[in-house]
Image (tube, helix red, strand yellow):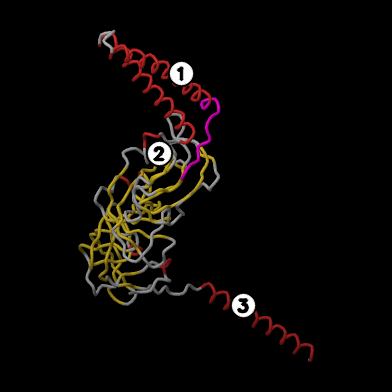
Amino acid sequence: MIKKILKITVLVLILAVFVWTIYFLYSKSEQQPVVYQTISPFDTTIVKKTVATGSVIPRKEVNMKSQVSGIIEKLFVTAGQEIKQGDVMAKIKIIPNMVNLANAENRVNQAQISYDNAKQEFDRNETLFKQNVISKADFLPYELKLKSSKEEMDAADNNMQLIKEGVTKSAGTATNTLIRSTITGMVLDVPIKEGSSVIESNTFNEGTTIASVANMGEMIFEGKVDESEVGKIKEGMDLVLTIGAIDKESFLATLEYISPKGITENGAIQFLIRAALSKTKGTMLRAGYSANADIILAKKEKTFAIPELVLKFEKEKTYVEVETSKDKYEKRFITTGLSDGINIEVLEGLKKTDKIKVPQMDKAIGAE
């Protein structure tokens, strides 16, 4: 009897476990009803823009070069210093070429000999002319020879002086050994030090840069845009610059140049653009700051809009699903306008009181 009761109990337990398993699997497989979030149209500002990357640089930056070769004897400027046009930046000590110097000294000696000889002939014939022994026509060639010899001697002397010191006696204060600024502005960089050798700027060599000077009061943005965007922009458009080194501040600029020729960079065609920055107050812009420029292609303020994520498409038409009653939606075709990639303008088909179904994949986005 006990064995029989035990068997019945085991069978009941097995049956109960089986029934519970069936119920559990059924309840797990039963699909939960989908509850969609909704969103209503709203007023917002839509700005369509493209982005160009580049840097902020001075419009006018000049590298000061040496006109003579030698050694920097004295530097009068440092980076960051404000200077005016004509200010002396450096003095160069000329180290003469020994061959050229020897030739110059030899020329001076020969000129001196010619002058001394011409002077003796002039003095002798001048006495004869005063005694009426020779005519004025016979005397004039000796006077001309003396003057020519004097000019040759002065030229030889000046040439030697120029080779030795970089300045002639007749030049006065004018000299190539003093490097002067050609513009008014700020010294950006002084790449050399006192005692450094410099090479003159000539046809075959650009020469050693003594310093870089720029007008920091007139800055421009120089960047590049992709070929897919260059057709959408034109001169005169507004730009909003964001500079990485300056937080929470943007700068206005006006597009003034678009290169007619593109260049290949990393397999893509890029076009150079330049924009003039508006004057800034209280903010120091340094040359070379990296910046991103938002080029405003179109802008609409306080326009009727919805998020782009709720849009659906049927052939060439655009529609949204509008709630008609709880958890019931109807298809409604709409006409759209300007888009910034997040929100899109609605021209026709919706009212502010409409509730639009948000796709399940974007459930994290709440209604506004």
Q: Are marks 3 and 2 in contact (CB under 8 Å)?
A: no
Q: Amino acid at mark 2?
A: Thr
Identify the element where label 3 is drawn. Answer: helix
Q: Amino acid at mark 1?
A: Ile
Give the residue pinned by disc 2.
175
Query: Residue 227, position in %: x, y?
Result: 36, 43
Q: Earlier in the sequence, mark 1 or mark 2?
A: 1
Measure the alpha-carbon separation of dots 3 and 1: 129 Å
Q: Earlier in the sequence, mark 3 or mark 2?
A: 3
Q: Residue at x 31, y 39 (%)?
A: 260
Vertical position of residue 267 compared to residue 344: above or below? above
Give the residue pinned by disc 1.
113
Identify the element where label 1 is drawn. Answer: helix
Q: Residues within 10 Å of mark 3 (few under 14, many from 20)?
A: few
Frontmost residue, 231 versus 113: 113
For the record, the magenta segment spans: 91-101
The mark lying in front, picked from 3 and 2, is 2
Q: Residue at x 26, y 10 (%)?
A: 132
The mark lying in front, picked from 1 and 2, is 1
Give the residue pinned by disc 3.
21
Measure the alpha-carbon separation of dots 1 and 2: 29 Å
